[in-house]
Amino acid sequence: MWASYSILLVFGLAVGLPGPAVPSLQDAYGLSYAGAALHLTLFSVGSAIGSALDDRLDRRFPRTTLLRASLTAVGIGAALCGIAPTAAVSLAGITVMGTGGTIAINIAHGVLGSEHADGRGTVLANAHLFAALGLVSAAVVVAGARAVGQWRLAFAVPVMVVAVILLTRQPQRLPARSTAPAETPAPPPPTSAAVRIGGIVLALSVAVEWAVTFWAASFLRDPVGLTPAFADAITIGVLTALVVGRWLLGRLTRGRAADLLLRAAFIVTIATSVPYLVGPRLPDTFGIIVPVVALVVLCLTVTMLFPLALAVTLTAAGGSATEQQHASATALGMGAAGAVITPYLLGAAADATTLNTALVVLPAGALFALLGIAAMHRSTQPAR
C-alpha cells in the first residue's frame, strides 16, 4: 500500500509545480496567461498519452518494470523543466512528466482498487491524501526556490523524490499481477457506458480542481492584489486545505456512498464560487478576506472531487485488478483529453478579459458534472 501511496505523492508533486510557478514562467519566457497555461494543458496531453498506452504496455511488460520506467520518465521530465532554456523545452518536459506520472498512478489505482474492493472509496481518498501533500509541497518548494532567487530549483525536487523511491525499491513492493501467458495476452475488458460517463465527470472534476489550484497564486496577485511574497505565503496556507480536505474525505467515505458525497462536493463548489469571484470587487479589507476564505473552502471541497469521481467510476467497473486498471486508464484518458483544452482556454479568456471573469468555469463545470453524475446513475440502472 505504501508503494502505491508514494506514487500518488510523486504525481501530486509533478502536477502541482506549474501552478505556483506561473508568475516565474511568465517572467522567464515572456508568456501570457494562455502561454503559461500550456504547461498544464501539455501535462494533460501527456496524461492522455499515458492512458492510451497503458493497456498495451501493461500486457507487454512486467508491472515492476513499467512502474520503474514511468517514474524515471517523471524525473527526466522534471529535469528538462528545470534546465529548459526556452518555453518549448519546458513544455516538452511537462508532457513527459504527465505521461510517466499517469502510467504510474494507473498501476497504483489498479492495485488499490482490487485489493480493497469493499472500502475502495476510503482507500482511494487516503491514497489521494498523499497526492494533496504533493500539491502543497510543490507550493512550498516553489515559494522557497523563488525566495532564494532560483525558481528552477523547484523542479529538482521531483527528481530527488523519484530517485529515493527507486533506490528504496518501492516498485518491487507492489503485488505481482495475475495475467494470461505472454504468448496469449488477455484483451482489455469492454468499457461500459457508466465508465465512459465517469470519464467525462472526471474531466470536469479535474477542470474545476485545476481552475482553483493552478491559478491560486495568480488569483491572489492579480484580482485580489496581494504582493508576490504575501501571495506565495497565502497560497501555501490555502493549499494546505487540500490536505485537510483529503484527510476529511477519508473519514466521510466510511459508510457513505461516494456518489452522494460527490454530488454534495459539486454543490458546495457552486455555492462557494460566488463569494470567490465577487469577493475581489468588495471594498477595503473585505476584498481580501472574502475571496481568501472562499478559496480555502474551495480547496477543502475541490480536493475531494477527483478521488470521489474515480471511486464512482471504478465502482461501475468490475472487481479484478485488470478491470480496475482498465477503468482507471479509460477514465483518466477521457479526463485528460477533456482537460487538455480547458487550461489554455481559461488562460486565453483571462488574457482577453480578466482572470476573475475567466474563472466562471468553476460553477459552470460543477453544474455540468452534476448532470453527468445523474446520467451515470441512470446508465447503471437495470432496463425495465
Image: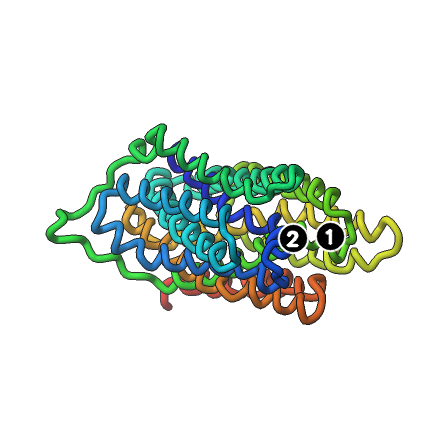
| Residue 170 falls in image quadrant | top left
Is residue 252 visible in the rendered image? The answer is no
Q: Secondary structure at mark 1?
A: helix
Q: Secondary structure at mark 2?
A: helix
Q: Quadrant of the C terminus?
A: bottom left
Q: Is residue 308 left or right of residue 27?
A: left
Task: Look at mark 2 in the image and give the residue it sits on.
Answer: 23
In this rendering, the answer to whether 362 lies above or below 98 is below
Q: Is residue 155 left or right of residue 315?
A: right
- Residue toward you, 121 or 181: 181
Evaluate if marks 1 and 2 touch, with contact meaning CB atoms under 8 Å apart.
Answer: yes
Q: Name the mark on residue 221.
A: 1
What residue is drawn where x is 28% and y is 46%? Answer: 320
In this rendering, the answer to whether 88 lies above or below 172 is below
Q: Is residue 256 left or right of residue 23?
A: left
Residue sitting farthest toward the front: 85
| Residue 317 falls in image quadrant | bottom left
